[in-house]
Amino acid sequence: MIREIKRQDIPECVSVIKTGFMTVADEFGFTEENAPRFTAFATDEQRLNWQFDEGRPMFVYVGNDDSIVGYVSLHITDNGECELNNLCVLPEHRHKLIGNMLYDHAVKAARQHGCKVMNIGIVEENVRLRRWYEKLGARHIGTEKFDFFPFTCGYMTADLSIKPMKHKRLDRDLWGFQHFPYYQMRIDCDIYHGFASVIRLIDGEPQYWSSPIAGKYPICGGGMLWLQLIPDNQNRLITASYLPEPKTIDGKEYPYSATSWYADVTEGWSYGADGVAVYVDKYLDVIFTPQGDVIRDDRDELDAAYEGGIITKAQYDSAISECESIINELCTDIDGTERWCAEILMLALQKIEQDDVTLKKGRGITE
């Protein structure tokens, strides 16, 4: 999970930053002698303590054992801009979307501070990192060479004021799940009419989110399932994450237990060229847990899209209306929602077992 740092975290943060950036130093031949100002060598407790006292937004990603495995900070300037600083993840925890989550969290924090632009500095020769930032929406704007660095400084910028609605695939390629077993189907029964899909997360270390009531809870990891529902005539996608642990609901035992739900407000959906369902993300989300958390998320993105002319007033109002409908229909009786989703999941797994699906793909699946 991601949280703001505490002063007592600073020594561990310094270690994470130095270790994270040392892999870049090793790859490109930077040393303390030829690049003493490079992050891996210049970061120390005095610098982070000064930034902490200055009130900079500073965040860490905490792993399963409460150790810090990732870090990011922002430097807010007076011109509606900010700088992204020291985004890093320990080498053994990379390729788990932790960097993506830290970046997204930094973007939200920057918007909350009124920033319209986020500037990013990179080692220009690190093409892999540049392409990663470009996938996240940043664009390259120039380079500069300094005598005190054995590399070229690259500069990128991310526009925080306008974010067009994104088309997102339900095999969750943005999460790195596109190779997992994935099933699509239509379900029509007494309790549900609409599209459904199931992703089997057959491996991977657990990743956690945190909420005020539930505390830390897993959202993905080996053995978990994701059930995704697009009900007929509604502008929402409901994603339920499940652990492979039995749970009894109203006297009936189910083989999986829900850890959370994430409901996206949508602007419609369709099928991609390969048949995988794709939805249009309309910014607003509702996150809720079995313990009773109900969190409206990404209102800042909706507001920015409306203020920037990306969406109309009618689209803005309909997103807010759909968000409130989700809360009223799914969150006022979370026990009922948990039972409803558990029954739909059982129907979906039965259809998978009977090969009664409209699309299946992924590791270990044969047509």
Image (spheres, grey):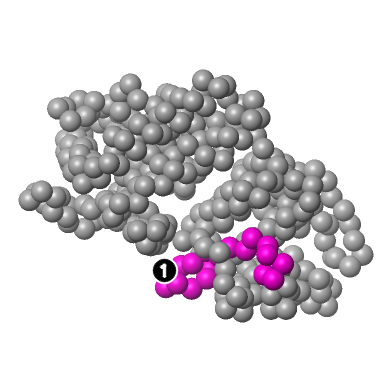
Question: Is residue 361 a member of the stretch shown in magenta?
Answer: no
In this view, which residue lies farthest toward the left?
Answer: 251
Check disc 1 and give the amino acid type.
Asn
Report the residue at 30% width, 28% height from top: 231
Horizontal side of 40 relative to 144 (left or right) equals left
Q: Residues within 10 Å of mark 1 (few under 14, many from 20)?
A: some
**In the image, residue 8 lies at what x, y percent?**
57, 78
Horizontal side of 286 relative to 129 (left or right) equals left
* Quarter occupied by residue 15: bottom right
Q: Is residue 184 visible?
A: no
Question: Is residue 67 a member of the stretch shown in magenta?
Answer: yes
- Counting every numbered tag in the picture gives 1
Between 285 and 314, the one lying in front of the other is: 314
Report the residue at 65% width, 34% height from top: 162
Report the residue at 30% width, 52% height from top: 292
Horizontal side of 107 relative to 234 (left or right) equals right
Report the residue at 60% width, 75% height from top: 7
* Residue that label 1 marks: 64
**In the image, residue 144 lies at what x, y percent?**
87, 53
Horizontal side of 322 relative to 103 (left or right) equals left
Q: Secondary structure at mark 1?
A: loop
Q: Is residue 71 above or below residue 243?
A: below
The quadrant of the rendering that contains the C terminus is top left
Q: Report the span colored magenta.
A: 52-70
Q: Is residue 105 above or below residue 90?
A: above
**In the image, residue 253 lies at what x, y percent?**
11, 52
**In the image, residue 12 lies at what x, y percent?**
58, 77
* Quarter occupied by residue 227: top left
Q: Is residue 112 visible?
A: yes
Between 54 and 2, the one lying in front of the other is: 54
